[in-house]
Image (spheres, helix red, strand yellow):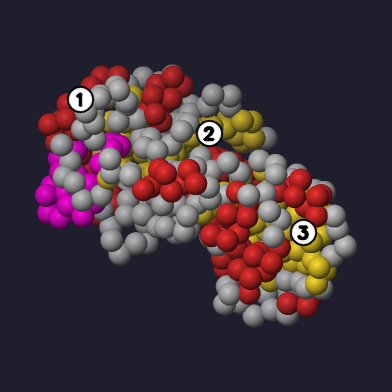
Amino acid sequence: MITKLENGSVTSPQGFQGGAAACNVKGVEKDDGKLDVSIVLSDSDCTAAGTFTTSQFVAPPVTIDQETLAKNNSTIRGVITNSGNANAATGEIGLKNARRMQEVGATCSNLNSDQFLVMSTGVIGVQLPMEKIEKGIVEALDDCGHTDTHGLRASKGIMTTDTFVKMSAVEVQLSGGPVRIGGMSKGAGMIHPNMATMLGVVTTDAAIAPDLIKQMMKNAADVSFNRISVDGDTSTNDTVLLLANGASGIEINPSNQEDFALFKQALIQVCTELAQLIVRDGEGATKFAEIVVSGAKSKAEAHQVANTIATSPLVKTALAGSDANWGRVMAAAGRAGVSFDQYATTLKIGNDGENWLALTESGLPADYAEADAAAIFAETDIHIWLDLAQGDAAETVWTCDMTHGYITINADYRT
């Protein structure tokens, strides 16, 4: 059984702490006391894994984390994050500063540098203000505690243009007893599959072997964080980390198929909720859309079509205008690079994923009232279902509308 924890956070699993500090990392003239240095800390060693941006334009924190996990993914103790500055396009100095963040965390905690992972988010091309960062790490570590309030503070400390915190936690009843999974994420723009400008930390008090945790992180990310898109842009800093400290005393082992499947389901549930919260908080977004493509020859082709629809500016602006313009959906599907028979397709829309209004049948306009379609598109949550009638594969992608607010936020992001 999987139970969602109310107000659950990255500190909900046993043995995890969270904390944050306000250091004006971005250097704004009017310091509003925004939390911008965040810590997630385990009381004991963790196995860990990460999934990262696929961009060739990669930030030093990503490089450092990849190097650290390649050398040591069995004694990780914490994650240090700063917002307001991405530490991207910063060269050797940026690498040195990312390592310095590890060193400061380690010195303050009587640990080794390679027991900390680091993440940064914010403006690209500016060196980190290390005096502020170092001070923030010390203060955030002093702020650390095990409560969900501390988890909330850690979550606030990683936000940039986010308008609300993104947290999720569940308790899973396994044959040996309960284990917990908790997490936090951030992201609102530069969001696209194969990681986006998202940061995330997922924790669990289950014990997971070093080799197994890598595969579990990849599998969960593939069906959650890699199934969302806000604007089609992939960032330099995208990172989601999974830490397992084993504080529950319960080990996740594939040999126990029932427990393994249930834990995997719970991990995907947490990651999916965190991913969907990112989409719901897309910069300037007012609507959340689920794009389902079924009847494809393969899951890869289904994803390709769904992703093309989800990233189409014409589809996204139609969502913003409550215009059920099915021609834009079909046009996006048609340019996805997947072969299908347009006169075999069916397109439906709805608000609850159960009751559907057909807009097209056999590739031609269906008999429906335009007012009914407009009413569906006027709601906050919209489901779009395209059946290609070519096979049995299906995939889902989550996206949002694109409004004038997106332009307003990104036109002057650096100021």
Image: 247 above or below 148: below
Give the quarter of the image for residue 364.
bottom right
Instruction: Name the disc covering residue 348, or none.
Output: 3
Look at the image and tell me in which quarter the C terminus lies: top left
The Cα–Cα distance between marks 2 and 3, rounded to whole angstroms, is: 31 Å
Badge 2: how crowded within 10 Å, few (<14), some, or many (20+)? many
Q: Amino acid at mark 1?
A: Val
Kindly identify the residue that appears in the image at 15 percent across and 37 percent down: 129
Kindly identify the residue that appears in the image at 40 percent across and 21 percent down: 150
Image: 84 above or below 228: above
| Residue at the spot of label 2 | 168
| Residue at the spot of label 1 | 138
Kindly identify the residue that appears in the image at 16 percent across and 45 percent down: 127
Are the residues tagged 1 and 3 within 8 Å (C-beta)? no
Look at the numbered disc 3 and give the secondary structure of its residue. Answer: strand
Q: Nearer the viewer, mark 2 or mark 3?
A: 3
Look at the numbered disc 1 and give the secondary structure of its residue. Answer: helix
Asked if residue 394 is among those painted magenta in the image, a careful observer would answer: no
Q: Which residues are magenta?
A: 80-101
- Observer-nearest of 112 and 257: 112
The Cα–Cα distance between marks 1 and 3, rounded to whole angstroms, is: 54 Å
